[in-house]
Image (spheres, rainbow, N blue to C red):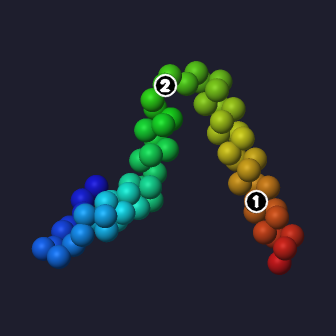
Amino acid sequence: MVVTLSETDRLDFVLKKFRRQVTKAGLFQDMKRTRFYESPSARRRRKDKAAARRKAKTARRREHY
């Protein structure tokens, strides 16, 4: 990640900008996921759960409109 600075930028603003870029890129989630070994079956279970959540979310959105 690269954050361009100018002479007048405050440190808290720059850190907030950097944190936003890292979060948007999904690096935090990736670091958390790869911190410990995850067995193939656990990975499959996690992905199936995420797919079910996405499917339920889209169903709720379709039902709402």
Considering depth in this image, is 59 or 31 the residue closer to the camera? Answer: 31
- Determine the residue located farthest toward the right in the rendered image: 63
Q: CA distance from mark 1 to mark 2?
A: 29 Å
Image spot of residue 11 (x, y percent): 25, 64
Q: Which residue is mark 1?
A: 57
SS type, badge 2: loop
Q: Secondary structure at mark 1?
A: helix
Residue 55: x and y, percent?
A: 76, 54
Q: Which residue is mark 2?
A: 36
In which quadrant will I find the C terminus?
bottom right
**Residue 15 in the figure: left or right of residue 32:** left
Please report whichever mark, 1 or 2, sits nearer to the chain's N-terminal start: 2
Q: Residue at x 45, y 29 (%)?
A: 35
Q: Is residue 49 above or below residue 63?
A: above
The residue lying at 58 percent from left, 21 percent from top is: 39
Amino acid type, label 1: Lys
